[in-house]
Every structure is written in C-alpha cells, then in structure tokens.
Amino acid sequence: MKLYAAFVFLLLAEIGNANAQSGHPYKLNWEIPGEELIYRSCGCADACWVAEVRSVRKMTVKATLRCDCEKLYFSEGKGLERIVSADCNEFSQVGKMDLISKRTKELRSPASRKK
C-alpha cells in the first residue's frame, strides 16, 4: 500500500510539473494602472518564454518581450518585432521575472508609457 501511495504521489507530481511547463500564463509584477504583464513559458527548459503587456479593459497587447531560446525580441502593439539582444543569458538568473518587468518598461517608447 505504501508503494502504491508513493507511486500515485510521484505521478501527480509529474502531472503538476508538466502543467507548469505547458505555457499556462500568469501575471508578473506590473505597477502601471490599466495594464497587466502576462508571462508564459514555451519550452527549452524555460528559456523560451513570452511576456505581454496587455490593456486590462480591452485585453489588447500593448508590448511583447520574448525569448526564443536564443535571441531576445521586443515589439509594441502591432509594430514590427526587433531583436534587442543576441542572447537571453541575462534572464537565466535568480530574479528573472523582475528583470522581465524591468526590461519591458525600459524598452517601451515614452509615448506608450503615458497613463
């Protein structure tokens, strides 16, 4: 019976791990009223990810910062995406989520930062 319980526990842990890596979005710290920053992983042991600034009211995407496992990209609204770094190494450290918020704020144009 103990072996069965241990097996069930491990199975549930693996299912939870798989769900955590499946790209389920969650909110990051974002202090700009009327907006939220949503993060989701897309693979590569969490080296592939997308963070989107969205309007809370309209749910439109206002800015996107993403890593494709290699390069870092940024775009605003429906604008063209541009490479902002040849790698995403700065995001492979403790404090990754705070750094995503910080870099997204830095990259946004002054006009888009107005309330």
Image: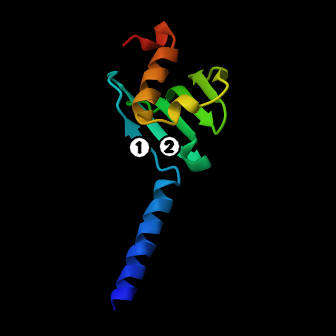
Percent from the top left, x then y, of residue 6? 37, 80
At label 2, which amino acid type do we have? Answer: Arg
User: Image quadrant of residue 37?
Assistant: top left
Closer to us: 107 or 47: 47
Q: Quadrant of the C terminus?
A: top left
Secondary element at image label 1: strand
Q: Is the image coloured rainbow, by chain, by secondary structure, or in one colour?
A: rainbow
Q: Quadrant of the N terminus?
A: bottom left
Percent from the top left, x then y, of residue 73? 62, 27
Q: Residue at x 41, y 67 (%)?
A: 13
Instruction: Give the vertical position of 11 relative to 69 (above or below).
Output: below
Closer to us: 114 or 86: 86
Q: Residue at x 46, y 60 (%)?
A: 17
Closer to us: 2 or 62: 2
Instruction: Give the vertical position of 114 relative to 6 (above or below).
Output: above
User: Image quadrant of residue 16?
Assistant: bottom left
At label 1, which amino acid type do we have? Answer: Tyr
**Residue beneath label 2, please?**
40
Q: Residue at x 48, y 22 (%)?
A: 103
Q: CA distance from mark 2 to mark 1?
A: 7 Å
Percent from the top left, x then y, of residue 89? 57, 31
Q: Are marks 2 and 1 in contact (CB under 8 Å)?
A: yes
**Residue beneath label 1, please?**
26
Q: Residues within 10 Å of mark 1 (few under 14, many from 20)?
A: few
Secondary element at image label 2: strand
Instruction: Give the vertical position of 79 relative to 38 (above or below).
Output: above
Q: Earlier in the sequence, mark 2 or mark 1?
A: 1
Q: Residues within 10 Å of mark 2 (few under 14, many from 20)?
A: many
Q: Residue at x 46, y 67 (%)?
A: 15
